[in-house]
Amino acid sequence: MDGESLERLMDVILQMRINLQHVTTTFQQQTLEIRQELAAIFEEKKRVLDGCLNGIDDKLKECAVHVEDYNRLYSSLNAMRQRLVQLGADPSPMPEPLPTEQLDGIVVWRLEQLKCQGKI
């Protein structure tokens, strides 16, 4: 190889090195941008899941209020039924009482009932 060929080869190698550095830099930049976009999407989906969980919490709080209402109304209806019996009436049967005072037990019981009825 003569000096001119060697110099052209070295120029080609230098240009390849510059191109490779450019490709590597571009790749690293794109990787960083994709990582940032995915992190933003992840955080958004995480916020959505937190919102769902808060919605579940709200519904459980509402459920607790309904359980209190049911117990209060059941007690009142039972007292009314007893008065009717004392007055000689033959009142209709009472609705089913809640199986427990604990909200978690009531939720599990009701879920099982709904599953058996094919509603969920």
Image: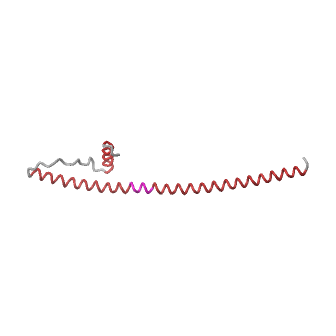
In the rendering, at what x and y percent does residue 11 appear?
Answer: 83, 53
Where is residue 67 shown, x and y percent of the image? 28, 53
Q: Residue at x 79, y 54 (%)?
A: 15
Q: Residue furthest front?
A: 118
Q: How many marks?
A: 0
Picture residue at 41% right of the left edge, 57% below the top:
54
Q: Is residue 22 left or right of residue 6?
A: left
Q: Main secondary structure of the magenta part?
A: helix
> Residue 104, position in %: x, y?
33, 49
Q: Is residue 70 magenta?
A: no
Residue 56, by quadrant, is: bottom left
Magenta includes 54?
Answer: yes
Residue range (magenta)? 50-56
Q: Quadrant of residue 76?
A: bottom left
As drawn, the residue found furthest toward the right would be 2
Furthest residue in direction left, as rendered: 88
- The residue located at (54%, 57%) in the rendering is 40
